[in-house]
Image: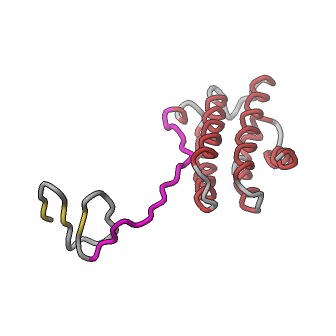
Amino acid sequence: MQENVKNIHISGIGGDVFSIDISGKGNVIDKNIAIFEMVNLDSDMLKEIPSLYAETLKNFCQSLNEQLTRHNIQKPQISQIQESVNRLVKEIEGAEIDQEVNAQKSTSIKVRLINVARNTLRVLPMTAEMVTLFTLLAPFRRLIGVVTQSIIKHIQKEV
């Protein structure tokens, strides 16, 4: 690699290169690259909830991100989903797998889960993949007392 004051010359390297003032033989320059926003889980927040729910949410978000990317969903819609996922995680704090939560906490978790579903169904088409996506949240039945699929069917009528 040779470097001078104005630019960088790259040679003998495979792969795409993107930056300002880069030249070189055999590199792809000025390629159209799309960078997608993803729904992420805060690892510190996940430490505060039971591992079953943390793993459930990780799997859900991984599948959700695949669908968001596949359908080319942009940042504003993803931000709404991200916010609702964060609120759901925060609401689950203090819940235990082997203990029932009180009615108020259960209702609050259900509302947060409904918001995640509502924000997701506003931007993604209702497909078999969506049914599978929300099936991943089945362990939350212990906290909310209903099957997540019934929530999705109800929201689908709204959206």
On the image, the x and y values in percent for residue 106 come to: 77, 29
Q: Is residue 40 magenta?
A: yes
- Taking 118 as reference, is 23 above or below it? below
Q: Position of residue 154 (x, y in %)?
A: 86, 45
Please name the residue shown 60% across and 35% down the image: 86
Q: Nearer the viewer, residue 12 or 97?
A: 12
Res 48 quadrant in image:
top right
Report x, y in % for residue 42: 51, 37
Q: Residue furthest bottom?
A: 26
Vertical comparison of 49 with 126: above or below: above
On the rendered structure, is 5 left or right of 109? left
Q: Position of residue 147 (x, y in %)?
A: 82, 45
Classify residue 75 as left or right of residue 4: right
Q: Which residues are magenta?
A: 26-44
Q: Quadrant of residue 54?
A: top right
Q: Nearer the viewer, residue 60 or 101?
A: 60
Identify the main secondary structure in magenta.
loop
Q: Residue furthest front?
A: 6
Q: Nearer the viewer, residue 34 or 94?
A: 34
In the displayed structure image, the side of residue 121 where residue 46 appears, left or right:
left
Q: Is residue 45 above or below residue 56?
A: above
Q: Residue at x 77, y 34 (%)?
A: 110
Depth check, front residue: 136 or 73: 73
140 within the magenta span: no
The residue lying at 74 percent from left, 52 percent from top is 135
Q: Quadrant of the N terminus?
A: bottom left
What colour scheme was applied to this rendering of the protein? secondary structure
Q: Quadrant of residue 80?
A: top right
